Every structure is written in C-alpha cells, then in structure tokens.
Amino acid sequence: MKRLLTSVIITALALCACTFDGIEYLEYAHIDTFGWTKKDTICLPNVKNIEGTYAQTLRLRFTKTYPYQSIQIIVNNKTGGKSKKRIVTCHLTNKEGDFTAKGVDYLEYECNIDTVSIVNGDSLLMSIWHNHKKDSIQGMSEIGVALKKLR
C-alpha cells in the first residue's frame, strides 16, 4: 500500500512538472462573439519569472459565423521598458473559402508572432487588438498567446 501511494505521488509530481509541448506560458482571454471592437484591447496577465528566449504564438478561437477570410491582429509586447509592436495577418480560409482552422463548432487557429527575450527580473506585458477596417467584428470567441522556450 505504501509503495502504491509513493508511486502515485511521484507520478503526479512528474506530470505537474511537465509542460504541454514545451509551452511554458499559455493564456486565453474571452471576446464577446457578438462584437469585438477596436477599442476592446485585450491585456494578458504579466509574464514573470521566466527568463529566456521564447517563440511567441497567437491562438484564435472563433465560430463559423466569422464572416471574413482573414484578420489582422496587433500584438504589443512590453518588456524591460521597451515596446515592440507586431502586426500579424491570420489567413483563416484557403483559396476556396474553406476554413483552415481545426475544430467543429469553435475553430482554433494559430500563427507565429515573434521571438521574445525575457531577462532576469523583467516581465512581459502583452496587449492585443484587431486591425480590421470594420470597427466591430463578430464571431471571435477567444484570443490567446503561447510562449515556447527556445533557449
């Protein structure tokens, strides 16, 4: 019995120590599917205490009611007192108009943003908004960012 309990605890600790696919940070924010306006800037929680260089990936979750083939997202990274803005174009459909994202009711799409370096003692603050011609867009449900350690 003692041996079984010990192996269960060790297995649980090993699973807790693992990260999914090498991702050390993954955070999503909810968006109102009935209208995401340009004024609705999404600020993800500060990333602290993870020194290193990371591949930054944008993740979108949306419904099939999203009426466009692509979307431009602006991501502003602020670290060490410096801001760096990136404009990411997400092509959500192929040439035939079929969604390229995975999913059934809610589709999930991801694309690379940038490489981000965080030094000891710094934090990373990420602000996100859309750069669509129309002020309010429908169909987006969540937007997220993943950080995968490179070195």
Image: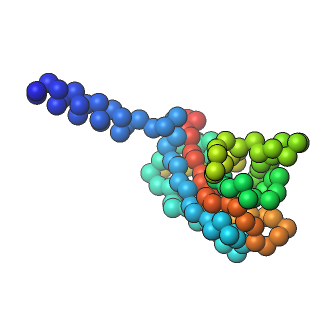
Residue beneath the point at 67% across and 41% down:
102
Question: Horizontal placement of 49 versus 147: left or right?
Answer: left
Res 80 visible: no
Count of picture labels: 0
Q: Residue furthest top?
A: 3
Residue 63 location, quadrant: bottom right
Rendered position, 3 above or below 107: above
Q: Position of residue 27 (x, y in %)?
A: 53, 54
Residue beneath the point at 60% across and 54% down:
144
Question: Horizontal placement of 132 versus 129: left or right?
Answer: right
Q: Out of 60 and 147, give the one closest to the viewer.
A: 60
Q: Position of residue 25 (x, y in %)?
A: 51, 48
Image coloring type: rainbow
Q: Residue furthest left?
A: 1
Q: Position of residue 13 (x, y in %)?
A: 29, 36
Res 143 visible: yes
Q: Quadrant of the N terminus?
A: top left
Residue 53 location, quadrant: top right
Residue beneath the point at 68% across and 60% down:
140
Q: Residue furthest right?
A: 95
Q: Position of residue 109 (x, y in %)?
A: 68, 46
Residue beneath the point at 67% across and 55% down:
62
Q: Quadrant of the C terminus?
A: top right
Q: Residue furthest front?
A: 105
Q: Out of 5 and 63, give the one closest to the viewer.
A: 63
Question: Horizontal placement of 26 versus 33: left or right?
Answer: left
